[in-house]
Image: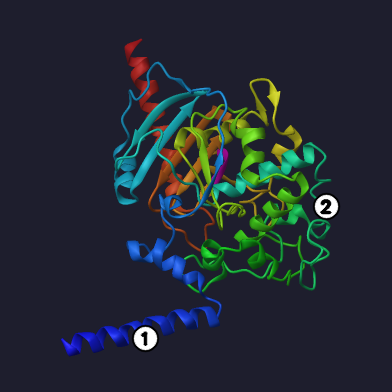
Amino acid sequence: MKFLIKFFKWFAIILVSIIVLMYIFNVDYLLRAVRTIYFKGYTTAFLEDYKEFPNREIKKGIAQPWAIATDYNSIPATEVLSKNHKELQTIAYLIIKNDSIWHESYFDGFDKNSKTNSFSMAKSVVTMAMGKAIMEGKMKSLDQKVTDFFPELKGKYAKEVTIGDLSSMASGLSWDEKYYSPFSIVTRAYFDDNLKDVILGLDIKEKPGQSFKYLSGATQLLAMCIEKATGEHLSDYVSKHFWQPMGAENEALWQLDEAPDGIEKAYCCIASNARDFARFGKLYLNDGKWNGQQLLDSTFVRKCITPRFEKSPEYGYGWWMHEIKGKKLFYMRGHLGQFVIVIPEDDLIIVRLGHLKGLQTKTDPHSNDLYIYVEEAYNMLAQRDKKNNTLH
């Protein structure tokens, strides 16, 4: 008995000492990380982690359900696609053809209304919000200086960086993108309860506007500029100008750094479902127009999906781009293999959500699962055409 008392006494002393040291060395955000992520067996953010954080609602308006194709789910997933779904733990896969849902699969207990984390697909949404703010005259142009909103911004090149640099990942910000390191700035940003101070504590250390370098902190700073320009929470602005007019069927949630008046973790963390995420793809497929209403300037939309830098043809402003089997496409992308893929030539939108992303190499900026989602969708459509020809 005495041994147990002594053991728990020393255990308590060590535990308290560790916590005190965390505060002394300014890594107390790790307490939140341990509580919300690591104790649950994860090494990084996960699909339903929005339940562990405060959120702000992205309110829906009058729902506009997707049309369902007459031959909905008539062709099963190919063997290659089914294997990929299993290996990478897909939870949703949609093929939307000619504005109608043609194929739809859900796994692991998820369904069409299930909310899961968008991760970095949110970056595309932040760029859309910037485009809307420019369209409304609340922001001047892509060339507007960030110091117009945050004159206290630090660093050698702080006065040069523009909101366009932030959106196109050419910010020069002092940031690293190490998702699995508990001591990286991206981990601090995810768990800290004062995200604004974290971002403004960074420097613009490299000359901005020169080349592509993917940094989540740039999107967070952009979102802070949008909030200042509009005088509205980002969630409210996106709800009013996109979520409601696009007829989302469910409200969405955007994670905050703290409740109730914190700021959105804008570089990630919109909790929604595959059908509603697909609406952003449809908006860009239609050059910013929705049911006859121009929600985004068409010139801005085209700029988003045009490479800014010749040496980085994979990225424009908030959107990724590629060409697969001769088909030009653009897409939203998230940390664990979240995709909204748009192929304008064939009026095609592909959505995939899941627990794991495919292999990402240094020689290809696109993960290998992207190719599978696109190529197998075309294989399924080819089977449909063959079946229809046989029937006729």
How is this picture coloured? rainbow
Dot 1: within a 10 Å radius of its alpha carbon, few (fewer than 14), some, or many (20 or more) residues? few
Q: Is residue 264 above or below residue 16?
A: above
> Is any atom of residue 181 visible in this view?
no
* Front-most of residues 284 and 146: 146
* Front-most of residues 83 and 123: 123
Q: Earlier in the sequence, mark 1 or mark 2?
A: 1
Please tell me whether mark 2 sits on a helix, a strand or a loop. loop
> Is any atom of residue 244 visible in this view?
yes
Residue drawn 54% across and 28% down? Answer: 346
C-alpha separation, residue under disc 1 versus residue under disc 2: 53 Å
Point out the image quarter for the N terminus: bottom left
Amino acid type indicated by mark 1: Ile
Q: Which quadrant of the figure has residue 135?
A: top right
Q: Nearer the viewer, mark 1 or mark 2?
A: 1
Q: Residue 357: image x %, image y %?
A: 42, 53
- Report the predominant secondary structure element of the magenta stretch: strand
**Which label was assigned to residue 259?**
none
**Which label was assigned to residue 13?**
1
Residue drawn 64% across and 21% down? Answer: 291
Q: Residue 62: image x %, image y %?
A: 56, 23
User: Is 331 contained in the magenta span?
Assistant: yes
Point out the image quarter for the C terminus: top left
Residue at mark 2: 144
User: Is 335 contained in the magenta span?
Assistant: no
Amino acid type indicated by mark 2: Gln
Q: Residue furthest left?
A: 1
Q: Which quadrant of the figure has residue 102?
A: top left
Dot 2: within a 10 Å radius of its alpha carbon, few (fewer than 14), some, or many (20 or more) residues? some
The stretch in magenta equals: 327-332
